[in-house]
Image (cartoon, grey):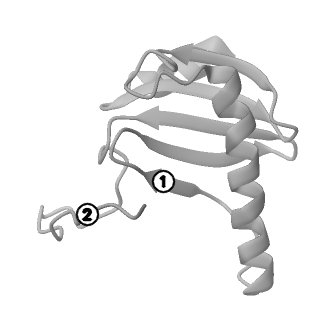
């Protein structure tokens, strides 16, 4: 399990990888979660991620969009990517802001705007 998580952490910009249960429990992690600008412990992030995923899944159901495959959140201090890997397990990647962004490969992305608060 650690080898798989280490592989994600070797990706550019990714600072930590975690496996989280659908109950918000930290199953495994590697990298520097909790040491970054947020200072939030991996166990706390695991619990917070589950509430966020539940809200995103509720949105998908209400809008009749189908199941959630990936959730990407890009904050000023950290980017997070969350994806289900099994029915009751989530993969969470923590990365430098902007490093997990979806955009055109030509570099012609729109300028970053002020964050929503």
Q: Residues within 10 Å of mark 2 (few under 14, many from 20)?
A: few
Question: How many numbered discs?
Answer: 2
Residue 53 image position (x, y, % from top left)? 71, 54
Residue 35 relative to residue 46: left or right = left
Among numbered discs 1 and 2, the one appearing first in the sequence: 1
Front residue of 99/46: it is 46
Closer to us: 94 or 77: 77
Alpha carbon distance from label 1 to label 2: 15 Å
The disc at residue 114 is 2
Q: Residue furthest bottom?
A: 63
Q: Is residue 92 left or right of residue 53?
A: left
Against 70, residue 104 (above or below) is below
Residue identified by numbered label 1? 73
Residue depicted at 51% across the width and 20% down the height: 33
Please tell me whether mark 2 sits on a helix, a strand or a loop. Answer: loop
Secondary structure beneath dot 1 equals: strand
From this view, report whether residue 37 is shown above or below residue 22: above
In the image, is residue 102 above or below residue 89? below
Residue at image location 44% in from the left, 28% down from the top: 38
Q: Residue at x 80, y 35 (%)?
A: 24
- Classify residue 108 as left or right of residue 31: left
- Is residue 60 found left or right of 93 in the rendered image? right
Dot in front, 1 or 2: 2
Residue 116 position, x and y percent, is 39, 64
Check the image and report above or below for 82 versus 1. Answer: below
């Amino acid at each position: 399990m650690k080898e798989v998580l280490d592989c994600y952490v070797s990706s550019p910009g990714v600072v930590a990888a975690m496996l989280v249960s659908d109950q918000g429990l930290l199953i495994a992690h590697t990298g520097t979660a909790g040491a970054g600008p947020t200072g939030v412990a991996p166990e706390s992030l695991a619990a917070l991620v589950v509430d966020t995923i539940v809200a995103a899944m509720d949105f998908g159901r209400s809008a009749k969009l189908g199941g959630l495959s990936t959730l990407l959140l890009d904050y000023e201090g950290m980017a997070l990517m969350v994806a289900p890997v099994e029915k009751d397990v989530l993969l969470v990647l923590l990365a430098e802001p902007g490093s997990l962004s979806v955009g055109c490969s030509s570099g012609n992305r729109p300028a970053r705007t002020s964050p929503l608060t």
